[in-house]
């Protein structure tokens, strides 16, 4: 048998045990993991240095090396994050519904673990701990397949995690790392119906699309965001400028940052020159529609392709629209159903926007950057779902659960 | 463009309108549909007769012809079922959560339609109406691809439905029938990410597996059930016999019927001969493990394959097990996570079974045949989900919805 099947089978066995653990048992195990990440930090940092050296030899970009790099401070943050997961309420066992039928059957709907969760992600060792511990807290087993550039780091981390679990009621086999770094191991995971209950991809667009296009196991699609901010005719200029700049430049590399600014033509006439200048000062390259170019002649003309692109960079499309309908039509065409914002003082327009835009999160007078599990108060986040099934938007622990109907009778049969 | 893309695009446009309709508008449209199915029944029955004649010419089995056949009485039932959907509460707009963040952001989580739902099903004209009207009530557009043997019936039904909708606020384009009866039209639907939000297969195992194996659009898997009844040592004989017989023979062709009876060996020693005889009298063919054959020497030896088979017929596997653990292990190995039952008077055993069996519905002292939207009191059912994502078990209207976060601020930006 392959590594993937062996480890998924071991995870499946462990999932049967996980399902029966108490919250206290799971929390105790997580605290051991949190501690071990600190006490074993020299081993982890040494392994991480191997990955970094290998990356430097291969000419890996400095931004990728930065995402790969662990330090004492970062390990402390990662360890602290595990302790925060301990503090979160355990969703397992929650009663979501309870009713009695006329024939006397008593039916309860309760939260149960999903079972075995496959996570496919990039070379980010922090995700290894984060994904594993969120899965454990919600009673699931995890099969992790991280990017090959972080393999040494991940091996060291998972060895530490599993050793800590072996001193707890949580079976060490509830956390599995796939070490085969070939594409074949991902392909195999994607077809592992029966052993994996769900696969969650975390990473860039090509990683996610590979999973969505090839998985037969159910997938929770995360991440891709071509997010818009629509500045309506009546918008307050100061507020609009603050929200738009925040949405673009506070952290351009993430999925909830803005890619396209839509500006009502009357607002544009009054303020677009000044607003465009503010983006130029913030080192943002503008790509504009024809009308925009009249206000910012230094901008590049935007193409059809630009409006569909998630830049995750200091680049912004700007389009002048004639009204709310025009803005809604643009978002319906180019949006990825992630996060969309209207800045307006007209409540009727805000209501239409909040109602009609089809997205995980729609905002009135606030930055799209708030679409985030921590900002929403969920205390943790396994990702941001951009699909409509199961979970939509920031996913906290309940998104890692399923439900079960428990039906108790006294001999009822169907007539 | 192909028929599938044309019609899915039209459905997508209509979904934007559906999202804005009131409950009253949707109900009014459904009442027009219910009426039209009766006033236009001659057209529908004539088209159905074409399908039946074609089926008879092709040597279609009498059971399939029966599922295809419409009559005045059946159309009345179908029309009545639409009126029952009118009576159900509209899930759209329901507030599932509402909270304010320390920075003043007000966040609401509300139910919204899924959008465009693809339904792939067999030659059952009643499913055409049922699926279309459940989708409409929950604010969705539907793209229906029924079995080719029912094409004339489906064309006539959908023409009646769309004509009725054209007299209402619901756009006729919210219901689309794919008439291309080649396999290619199904394959095309399965890859239509962006136009279809979800595909729900309804039908036999091969139809469902084709969808699960080939879809890139998210799928809600329904239906396949290898259900077990475990009769524990302490079970009341009369109750055990009534539940087991009901689970097998009340309607063997459906997914919540029992395929394997597990019997504690002490119970077997006292009662299995008599119980086996009761199944023989009910014309059920038994396939037994070695121990079973001692009590029912006329039974056939059961193979490994038999235990994994959904017969949907008057055939039953019987296996003697030594305790609850043995029963749990068998179910974990061969069950399809649909419906599982324990008959016992020992509460500890019942609790373990309800807790540890991983299935959509687990029963203590009641027939598995109750896993059904109507029996659970949901008033309607689009299918029974056997997956763990999104919905599990009988799916009522809320299973046809997603959620949206509406976030209202007064200029908040992320720091």
Image (cartoon, coloured by chain):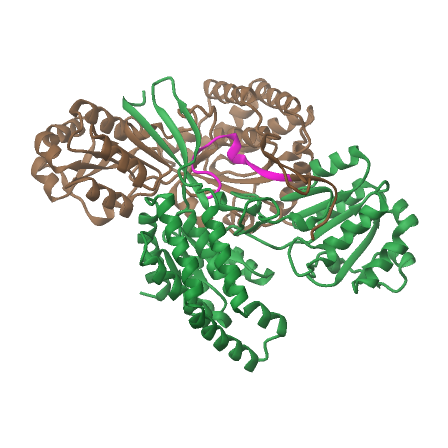
Chain colours: A green, B brown
**At which x and y percent is residue B325?**
21, 43
**At which x and y percent is residue B256?**
34, 33
Instruction: Looking at this view, name the residue that lies furthest to the bottom.
Output: A57
Nearest the eye: A144 or B58: A144
> Quarter-wise, where is residue B155 in the image?
top right
User: Relative to A293, is A305 on the left or the right?
Assistant: left
> Quarter-wise, where is residue A317 in the image?
bottom right
Where does the magenta region start and end?
Answer: B389-405
Which residue is drawn at the image coordinates 11% and 44% (left, top)? B290
Which residue is drawn at the image coordinates 77% and 55% (left, top)? A245
Which residue is drawn at the image coordinates 24% and 26% (left, top)? B243
User: Relative to B319, is A371 on the left or the right?
Assistant: right
Q: Is residue B396 inside the magenta stretch?
A: yes
**At which x and y percent is residue B113?**
60, 36
Residue B381, above or below A331: above
Residue B35, above or below A64: above
């Amino acid at each position: 048998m392959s590594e993937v099947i062996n480890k998924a089978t071991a995870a499946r066995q462990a999932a049967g045990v996980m399902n029966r653990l108490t919250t206290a048992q799971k929390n105790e195990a997580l605290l051991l993991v949190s501690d071990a990440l600190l006490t074993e930090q020299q081993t982890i940092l040494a392994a991480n240095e191997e990955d970094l050296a290998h990356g430097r030899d291969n000419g890996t970009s400095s931004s990728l090396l930065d995402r790969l790099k662990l330090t004492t401070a970062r390990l402390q943050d990662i360890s602290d994050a595990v302790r925060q997961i301990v503090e979160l309420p355990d969703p397992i066992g929650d009663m979501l519904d309870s009713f009695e039928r006329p024939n006397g059957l008593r039916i309860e709907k309760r939260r149960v673990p999903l079972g075995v969760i496959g996570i496919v992600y990039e070379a980010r060792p922090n995700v290894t701990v984060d994904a594993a511990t969120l899965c454990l807290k919600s009673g699931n087993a995890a099969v992790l397949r991280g990017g090959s550039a972080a393999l040494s780091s991940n091996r060291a981390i998972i060895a530490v995690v599993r050793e800590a679990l072996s001193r707890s009621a949580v079976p060490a086999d509830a956390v599995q790392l796939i070490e085969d770094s070939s594409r074949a191991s991902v392909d195999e995971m994607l077809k592992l119906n029966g052993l994996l209950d769900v696969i969650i991809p975390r990473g860039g667009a090509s990683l996610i699309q590979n999973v969505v296009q090839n998985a037969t196991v159910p997938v929770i699609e995360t991440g891709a965001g071509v997010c818009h901010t629509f500045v309506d005719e009546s918008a307050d200029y100061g507020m609009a400028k603050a929200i738009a700049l925040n949405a673009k430049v506070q952290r351009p590399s993430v999925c909830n940052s803005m890619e396209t600014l839509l500006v009502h033509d009357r607002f544009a006439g009054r303020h677009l020159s000044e607003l465009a200048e503010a983006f130029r000062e913030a080192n943002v390259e503008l790509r504009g529609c024809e009308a925009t170019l009249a206000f910012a002649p230094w901008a590049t003309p935007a193409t059809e392709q630009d409006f569909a692109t998630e830049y995750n960079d200091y680049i912004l499309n700007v389009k002048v629209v004639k009204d709310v309908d025009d803005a809604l039509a643009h978002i319906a065409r180019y949006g990825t159903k992630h996060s969309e914002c209207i800045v307006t003082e007209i409540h009727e327009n805000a209501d239409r926007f909040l109602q009609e835009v089809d997205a995980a999160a729609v905002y009135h007078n606030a930055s799209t950057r708030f679409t985030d599990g921590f900002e929403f108060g969920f205390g943790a986040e396994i990702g941001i779902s951009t699909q409509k099934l199961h979970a939509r938007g920031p996913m906290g622990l309940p998104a890692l659960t399923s439900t079960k109907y428990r039906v108790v009778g006294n001999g009822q049969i169907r007539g």
